[in-house]
Image (tube, rainbow, N blue to C red):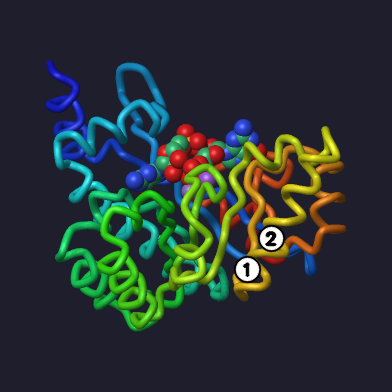
Amino acid sequence: LSMENQLRRAFDNEEFVLHFQPKVSLATGKVTGAEALIRWNDPATGLVPPGRFIPVLEETGLIHDVGRWAMCQAIECYLRWCDDGLAGVRIAVNVSSLQLRNRGFVAEVAKVLSGDPRAASGLELEITESMVMGDINHGIDSLQAIRNLGVTVALDDFGTGFSSLSYLARLPIDTLKIDRSFINNVAVTTEGLALVSTIITLAHSLRHTVVAEGVESAEQARLLRSLDCDEMQGFHFGRPVPCAEFEALYLAPL
Ligand code: G
Ligand code: G
Ligand code: MN
Ligand code: NA
């Protein structure tokens, strides 16, 4: 069976699952949201990480159906938390550049939200710099239309795309996520610390919330706090887990 057919069958058999990784506020220590990360629960081999199949979903166009499914699943999980009295956290869903460039994408997001009036306040979309660069004006219009729906937008993997700062200033985004390759060095070299400090200052000057990704140690967390970073995500705070487990571990009152 080709990888394409395997993935098509996996989608039909509902073998994809979303896991949710917590984001934590530095000011309050509380969980402010989650990033949804897709996995393929292959009955033959177990959980397959997204790096192994997202490129194939993109090559085959399956990413549009799977991407819509991921938004729906994230909203379903969020509404479950709301029903349990745990509203107030957003779930961020990664969007492929092929989805964002699709002319029908904003209408699709609107449709996904239309099932429940609470849905929009539970959704964030994560995009990358390169996604918007192809057609910057269309990208900006789409992001603004998405925000007009009440959905927030985060710029993911920041610092790896080398896009110009004039583009960054034009992007209608709420949050900037510093790529984990920078966080790796924050406690290692003075240059690494200076770079992250500069990114945080830049993001704040544009009035964006700053999230540090891939925080793995208490030392990194301490340094990021001293740099006035807003939120952190990484194995130091929690690994990605299924919806019900996330609720029990990170949201349920003790
Ligand atoms: O969980 P892991 O570190 O293996 O994720 C690897 C990459 O897969 C990340 O860059 C993440 O953005 C991407 N990814 C995870 N879930 C999704 C998804 O639902 N859609 C898209 N397009 N990418 C995803
Ligand atoms: O590109 P994106 O930021 O969407 O990728 C998120 C990926 O990073 C997920 O696959 C997740 O499993 C992984 N990840 C999350 N926290 C950590 C961490 O603390 N260290 C490392 N090495 N990877 C992490
Ligand atoms: Mn991401
Ligand atoms: Na990232």
Residue 57, above or below 110: above
Estimate the x, y position of residue 56 in percent, counting from the top left: 24, 30
Residue 23 tag number: none
Asked whether residue 1 is in view, the answer is: yes
Say which element carries label 2: strand
Residue 231 tag number: 2
Residue 149, above or below 106: below
Estimate the x, y position of residue 75 in percent, counting from the top left: 37, 65
Q: Nearer the viewer, residue 91 or 57?
A: 57
- In the visual, does 73 lie left or right of 58? right
Kindly indicate whether the residue at mark 2 contacts the one at mark 1 (C-beta within 8 angstroms): yes
Q: Residues within 10 Å of mark 2 (few under 14, many from 20)?
A: many
Inspect the image, locate mark 1, and give the three-letter code of the amino acid beneath it.
Thr
Say which element carries label 1: strand
Instruction: Report the residue at 71% width, 35% height from top.
Output: 184
Instruction: Give me the C-alpha separation between circle 1 and circle 2.
Output: 8 Å
Inspect the image, locate mark 2, and give the three-letter code of the amino acid beneath it.
Glu
Estimate the x, y position of residue 33 in percent, counting from the top left: 57, 62
Q: Nearer the viewer, residue 42 or 189?
A: 189
Estimate the x, y position of residue 152 in percent, counting from the top left: 45, 71
Instruction: Report the residue at 39% width, 30% height from top.
Output: 51
Residue 200 in which image quadrant: bottom right
Quarter holding the C terminus is bottom right
Q: Residues within 10 Å of mark 1 (few under 14, many from 20)?
A: some
Asked whether residue 241 is in view, the answer is: no
- In the visual, does 50 lie left or right of 246? left
Quarter holding the N terminus is top left
Residue 209 tag number: 1
Q: Ligand 3 closer than 8 Å to the CB at disc 1?
A: no
Q: Ligand 2 closer than 8 Å to the CB at disc 2?
A: no
Residue 182, above or below 211: above
